[in-house]
Amino acid sequence: MHFVIVGAGALGSIYAAYLARDGHRVSLIARGERAAALARHGIPVTGQESFTAACEVVTQPQTLRDADVVIVAVKTYDTHQALAPLRGMKTQCAFSVQNGVLKDRQLSEAFGAQATLGAISMVGGDVLPAEGGLPGPVRYNMANPTIVGELTGGTSERTAQIVDAFVHAGLKAHAADDIVSSEWSKFVAWSGFSTLAVLTRLPTWRFMADPDTAPLVARVMRETAAVAIVHGVRLQDSGFSSRAFIEGSEEDAIQAVQAHGERMRVNAPGFRQSILQDADRNRRLEVNETLDYTLELGAKLGVPTPTLEWCCRVLRAVSRANAEGRP
């Protein structure tokens, strides 16, 4: 299969390396010094495995004419610019592994509704610093699945083909009957994780387990879930999107957050959210295209989101300072 992967950050590099190593044709859209280094030396991977895979590195995406699958893996604020030169490209399907739930609409506008699939990525990784002219290795530290599905519901031959390609390449993946539910359910949890990650600058387990920050995590999640439900989304009845978590007492919700934090203390003590990695590097944050959408939708639907609004005000200030180059 021919995969066009948009973005050479952690996720894009992981997908490109594994699929290319397995013999697929991979066109990785990258830019700047990283693009040049990847083209010369290949994509170095550490973490789950250590290997280097070579693929086609594309710096002029308008030259691409067709693909079997397009995978979008840029930051949400770069989506419009990244997709602009690809509009009109022929592809059987396109999906995004970005955060948030606006991405499917953006892909439909670029490639058409028929070509657009829903997807979520539970993969975790980060790009390490480049040294000696070599590209920074991508550290693959959370080998969780990528989930794809038809936005209209159900599975299909094309989702099965993508899953088979991923699994054969050594990546975990499966198809979902209700990908919209999966996307929103992940977004509920991600919203709580991401807001407190930036506010505290702590590894995930710490702010989830701490009695002062766990209540804020729980409130952001429950407010996001309330917006989704009124919007007509059927959330998955598990974890932080379960009825017990959403409709139960706040005390029970806080205890569930803290219990998850304690599990992470054992299983992933050093894990830091990707948005925190951006904050640490003084980069823009994915706020406007993700969390702000929840605020806008909540205001439209009449669902109060006071905790999320407070958190977003702080995150927007941090993002603006980063964008302006101020400490």
Image (cartoon, grey):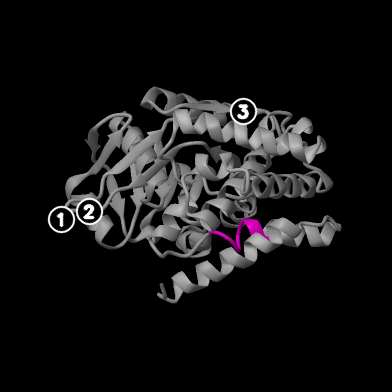
> Label 1 is placed on what type of residue?
Gly
**Mark found first going from the N terminus, 2 or 3:** 2
Q: Which residues are magenta?
A: 286-292
Relative to the observer, which residue lies in front, 238 or 96?
A: 238
Specify the quadrant of the image occupied by residue 13: top left
Q: Residue at x 67, y 33 (%)?
A: 256
Residue at position x 37%, y 46% in the image? 126
Identify the mark at residue 69; answer none if there is no mark. none
| Rendered image quadrant of residue 149 | top right
Determine the residue positioned at 28% across, 38% down: 45
Residue type at mark 2 is Ala
Is 231 in the magenta? no
Q: Is there a contact, CB below 8 Å, between mark 2 and mark 3? A: no
Q: Residue furthest right?
A: 302
Residue 214 point in image, percent of width and height: 63, 44
Marking on residue 156: 3
